Amino acid sequence: MISEDMKIKTASNLAWRFAERIGAHGFSFILSVVLARLLLPEQFGLIAMVTVFTTIMVIIIDCGTANALIQKKDADDTDFSSAFYFNAFLGVVSLAFMFVVAPLIAGFYGEEELTGLVRALGFMLPIQGLVNVQLAYVSRMLIFKKLFFATMGATVGSGVIGVWMAYTGYGAWAIVGQRLSCAAMSAVILWLGTKWHPRFLFSLGRLKGLLRYGWKLLATSLLDSGYASLGRLVIGRLYTPSDLAFYSKGQIITDSFVYSVNDSVDAVILPVMSQVQGSPPNVRAIARRAIKTGSYFMWPLMLGLCVVAEPLVRLVLTEKWIETVPYLRIFCLICVFNPLHTANLGAIKAMGRSDLILKLALINKTIGIAALLVVMRHSVMAIMCSMLFAAIISSFINAYPNKKILDYRYFEQVRDILPTIALTAVMIAAVYPIAVIGMDDFWTLSLQLVTGLTIYVLGSVVLKLESFTYAMALFRSYRKRWQKRTSPNKTGI
């Protein structure tokens, strides 16, 4: 059985990670709203074209070493320092590579302005190389409180810079300035706030050991990111920058909500599972709890966002972004499967089966790319539908190995979240008709949000949903622990 201390430690770090994600994505969402009002969709589309390549380079720099450091039971300073110097070297090489290929990327899209944008955003890569191992240390030691302050400080500070640049007429360069300053500030704060720093230690043998585990995760991440970026690449090449901007904005909005939950669970469950990897029943229990708790928040959040998408976009982003709505709704449907993906893949990684992770990625991406190739010249919406199809199929495929590894079958997982799905359906049935009453967007959105939240919370209480009860129990335990820490020592008065 998992100890009570481990449960409290997990809950505490999940709370800090969730606070960090909700704060970062919440502020980023506000920032994107402000920038969307100051900039044109085409300018966002240019940055989306560049992001395809920088995202892939960030994954290459890491090489799977972060996950390897978290998963390795006896990782020490030699492991961490070796990985650090290797990541830093790859960061510099990646910057040089981006300088060389920038004109080719601009030529591929037929947008001359992209050359400078690609080269400028390339400076994020060496910064990422310096911070990767710090992030792995934070995850391994379960000290997400440090990450909270680094992320929030960088997000707010860079947001001010980005808004000022947009307001003074820098156009797409305002987004570049915001991203570069965010990466730099986050790195500085994280370095100042964590105890670990690289030592003059390097072992090629240790590095090879990390890469033996990590290269499969690197290949998996490249497949995942490459597939996710393929949609943007195809839309940017076959359609207009505005089409890509509407598509990307729908993705950004869902990411602002989804990754507050998904990243929090993903970042915490791998180190926790890795600590009990010798006991499949304990890993199964953590995976099951992650699926139930993640789905409890994800389903109402995503389907609720799907219903309120039109008044939300029109009210917050203005009418010029209304074409984002259908893309946003499809992204919401894709994301409800994230808790299943996260928990199942996290369990497989924690059990040391990075080979299975790669095999699953190959199967999933082959299906997704095949579907994309069939429909890519029909329309952007057809591309979105192919992604939804791939997400549904992947939820089956990613769960399949855990039938043997953890004795946790896909239909058991679905059964675990059925109460959440049923309550979400009731909530949607009550919220959807509000849109046809004919009120203005502000009152429509406000009434939908209040109605949806009220029904979901009251339904959880009345039905005594296990996930709700569990979340409240953890909250009370953490609150008592916090009060005990912060209360004055009465015996010393």
Image: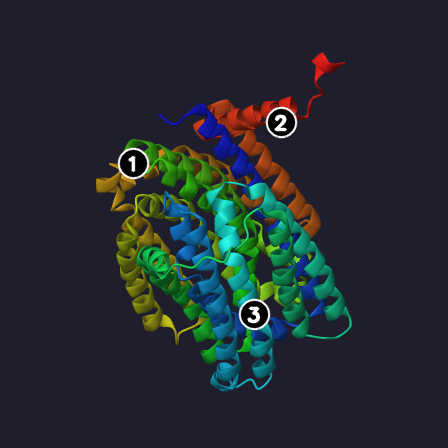
| In the depicted structure, whether residue 436 falls above or below residue 277 | below
Mark 3 = which residue? 245
Q: Residues within 10 Å of mark 3 (few under 14, many from 20)?
A: many
Q: Which comes sooner in the sequence, label 2 or label 3?
A: 3
Residue 333 visible in the snapshot: no
Q: Which amino acid type is shown beneath numbered disc 1?
A: Gly
Label disc, if present, on residue 482 of the rendered structure? 2
Mark 1 = which residue? 278
Most extreme residue toward the left is 404
| In the depicted structure, whether residue 408 falls above or below residue 90 | above
Nearest to the eye among marks 3 and 1: give it: 1
Between 451 and 54, the one lying in front of the other is: 54
Between 50 and 271, the one lying in front of the other is: 271
State the image quarter where residue 360 is shown. Answer: bottom left
Between 94 and 301, the one lying in front of the other is: 94
Q: CA distance from mark 2 to mark 1?
A: 31 Å
Numbered disc 2: secondary structure: helix
> Where is residue 458 drawn, in percent x and y?
55, 28
Q: Which comes sooner in the sequence, label 2 or label 1?
A: 1
Q: Which amino acid type is shown beneath numbered disc 3?
A: Ala
Query: Image check: 439 left or right of 55?
Result: right
> Where is residue 29 drawn, in percent x and y?
63, 55
Q: CA distance from mark 3 to mark 1?
A: 46 Å
